[in-house]
Amino acid sequence: MTHDIPRPDAHQALREALRDLCKPFDSAYWQAVDEARGYPEAFVKALTEAGWLAAMIPTEFGGSGLGLTEASVIMEEINLSGGNAGSCHGQMYNMGTLLRHGSAAQKALYLPKIASGEWRLQSMAVTEPSTGTDTTQLKTTAIRRGDRYVVNGQKVWISRVQHSDWMILLARTTPLSQVARKSEGMSVFIVDLQQALGQGMSVKPIRNMVNHETNEVFFDELEIPADNLIGQEGQGFRYILDGLNAERSLIAAECIGDAYWFVDKARRYANERQVFGRPIGQNQGIQFPLSESYIETEAANLMRFRACALFDEGQPCGAEANMAKYLAAKASWEAANVCLQTHGGFGFAAEYDVERKFRETRLYQVAPISTNLIHAYMAEHVLGLPRSF
Ligand SMILES: Cc1cc2nc3c(=O)[nH]c(=O)nc-3n(C[C@H](O)[C@H](O)[C@H](O)COP(=O)(O)OP(=O)(O)OC[C@H]3O[C@@H](n4cnc5c(N)ncnc54)[C@H](O)[C@@H]3O)c2cc1C
């Protein structure tokens, strides 16, 4: 091998710091967490204490004031180390809603505690069982009564609720029949989970293919102080959309970390494993899919850095963030498949980590936005085709 995977870039110092932090959380650590269906508490604690999850919080609120580019390198390195940033990525980007749309008092109250890790804002509740991707049809309501909002309804697939102190909630505050556009009349709240649990909110974990803490959430007359409304009532859908470019770019970076991990793992094995008296990597049937995966990962990586650079310059980056997420999720999934195939039967053995990472990276074709919806965005907003839904 002539160079590292990924190749050295402008972020080496940051990469080295992350590699040092991730080193103790090795293959055995992540296997044990996966087997126990546990939460990587020690890893998330170390990451929080080192300040990495506060990368995008401005320095005036106790964060590091770094850009999306650097934040994406942090996420990439976690997955490249063999870990899974999906256990904690919400803490990095969920605060964006507060930062962009919260009042001065809300920012002063929440951001420093989120930056220090004292308060975990790992959860964001948007998806509902009966409406799925069609978010504007969501059924959860928040009705103003005096100095409180009363919430009723249900969410599904809400991640990290059990490892969070606060949750961002999107709910309808004005009925669909009373708004001019279906994207109006929804609002965003910050919910105190300790207070809400057992007093109008209940949580039911969903056992799933990945070791990912995700839940059904039920609201029955949950009362939220009116002060916990973020921004203007009725504008919540727009606020959530504002956060999606950062989320997509960060998740693209996680996929790129995974993709490089799979290529590296496979090329090492292909060099070592001898069958028919020669390394399997001598066969073009093994080489070419690996080459293809590497090429596609490098291309996705360029788009990731393009999306992040535009975001950091304050430029529109919807198309680039979507393309980065699409290319990266595709590259990581194809690399996962190639890596598993290269390992033959051993790819199925938990001790090689391939089957675990294979399961983990598959998620990103579906969440936080499914591949079809990226195509729908590109068709409408970039190619000028009629809206399909
Ligand atoms: C492990 C996990 C964690 C998650 N965490 C969170 C979370 O923390 N917070 C949260 O709010 N949500 C979360 N989600 C939900 C996730 O964002 C949704 O699953 C995703 O947006 C798809 O919604 P759906 O599952 O309802 O699929 P559906 O909307 O039912 O779609 C099913 C399929 O149909 C396709 N489809 C639907 N409409 C169209 C169309 N018009 N054109 C073409 N294809 C279409 C979709 O692409 C998809 O492939 C999580 C999901 C998972 C699996």
Image (cartoon, rainbow, N blue to C red):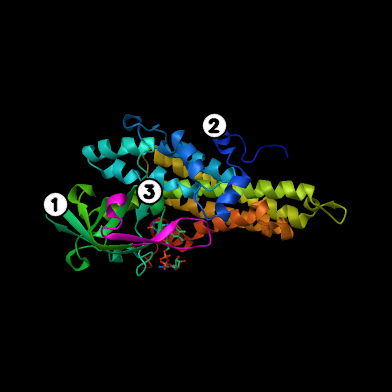
Of the 4 image quadrants, the one containing the N terminus is top right
For marks 2 and 3, give the one nearer the viewer: 3
Query: Label 1 belongs to which residue?
Result: 147
Q: Mark 1 is on which residue type?
A: Asp
Q: Neighbour class for label 3 at 10 Å: few (<14), some, many (≥20)?
A: some
Among the two numbered marks 2 and 3 on one chain, the one whose residue lies closer to the N terminus: 2
Mark 2 vs mark 1: which is more N-terminal?
A: 2
Which element type, helix, strand or loop, lies under badge 2? Answer: helix
Measuring 55% from the left and 50% from the top, which residue is drawn there? 33
Q: Ligand 1 quadrant?
A: bottom left
In percent of width and height, residue 231 lies at 22, 47
Q: Which mark is residue 67?
A: none
Check the image and name the residue furthest to the front.
198
Q: In the figure, is residue 185 to the left or right of 336? A: left
Q: Is residue 230 above or below residue 22?
A: below
Disc 2 C-beta below 8 A from ligand 1: no
Look at the image and give the residue range highlighted in magenta. 193-217
Please name the residue shown 28% across and 62% down the image.
219
